[in-house]
Amino acid sequence: MPRTRNRLITAARHSMLQRAELHRRLDVARAALKPGALVDRGKYRIGEKVDDAANAVQQQFRDNRLPIMIAAAAGIAWLLREPIKEHAPRLARKAQDLAADVADHFRSADKPADEDDIEIVEEDDEAVR
């Protein structure tokens, strides 16, 4: 009878251990399925996806700087197309006026020098003949 008793005690012990393990697993599953835990897990996964996407964008930018910069400049110009249409003629007119003023300034400063150079050149031509 002592052997049977020892077997029963051992079986009861194993049963208690299995039951404790099942309760522990059940508690873990319950905790994982709580709304707060689900939200936290979702936030973590979304954060991971955002980080992966940001790293991919940074790598593409490092690999293709010039085309991306050209596209960005074109996008900004497109966004500002209405103000550009409105202000571009005035700015072009101002730039032309400024260029004309600079050209006139240099022309007026060079006229006396050009006349002297022309006479000298003519004199040199006559001396060579």
Image: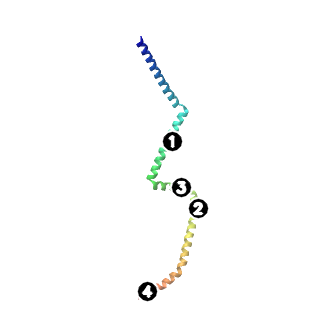
Query: Badges 3 and 1: C-beta atoms under 8 Å apart?
Result: no
In this view, 99 is above or below 74: below
Residue at numbered disc 1: 47
**Which numbered disc flags the more N-terminal residue, 2 or 3?**
3
What amino acid is labelled 4 in the image? Asp
Residue 80 horizontal/vertical position (percent)? 56, 56
Nearest the camera: 38 or 92?
A: 38
Give the number of the disc on residue 76.
Answer: 3
Q: Amino acid at mark 1?
A: Gly
Q: CA distance from mark 3 to mark 1?
A: 29 Å
Q: Residues within 10 Å of mark 3 (few under 14, many from 20)?
A: few
Q: Earlier in the sequence, mark 3 or mark 1?
A: 1
| Residue located at (52% from left, 30% from top) | 31
Q: Secondary structure at mark 3?
A: helix
Please report contact status of discs 4 and 2: CB closer than 8 Å, yes or no: no
Mark closest to the chain's N terminus, 1 or 2 = 1
Gap in angstroms between the C-alphas marked 4 and 1 = 84 Å
Three-letter amino acid code at disc 2? Answer: His
Q: Which residue is mark 4?
A: 125
Q: Nearer the viewer, mark 4 or mark 1?
A: 1
- Reply above or below: 27 against 99: above
Query: Distance of mark 2 from mark 3, alpha carbons?
Result: 16 Å
| Residue under the point 47% across and 48% down | 57
Q: Residue at x 54, y 70 (%)?
A: 99
| Crowdedness near tag 4: few (<14), some (14–19) or many (≥20) residues, C-alpha within 10 Å | few
Q: Position of residue 77 (x, y in %)?
A: 53, 57
Residue in the image at 54% along x and 73% along y: 103
Q: What is the number of the mark on residue 87?
A: 2
Give the quarter of the figure containing the N terminus.
top left
Dot 3 or dot 4, earlier in sequence: 3
The reply to whether callout 2 and callout 3 are in contact (CB within 8 Å) is no
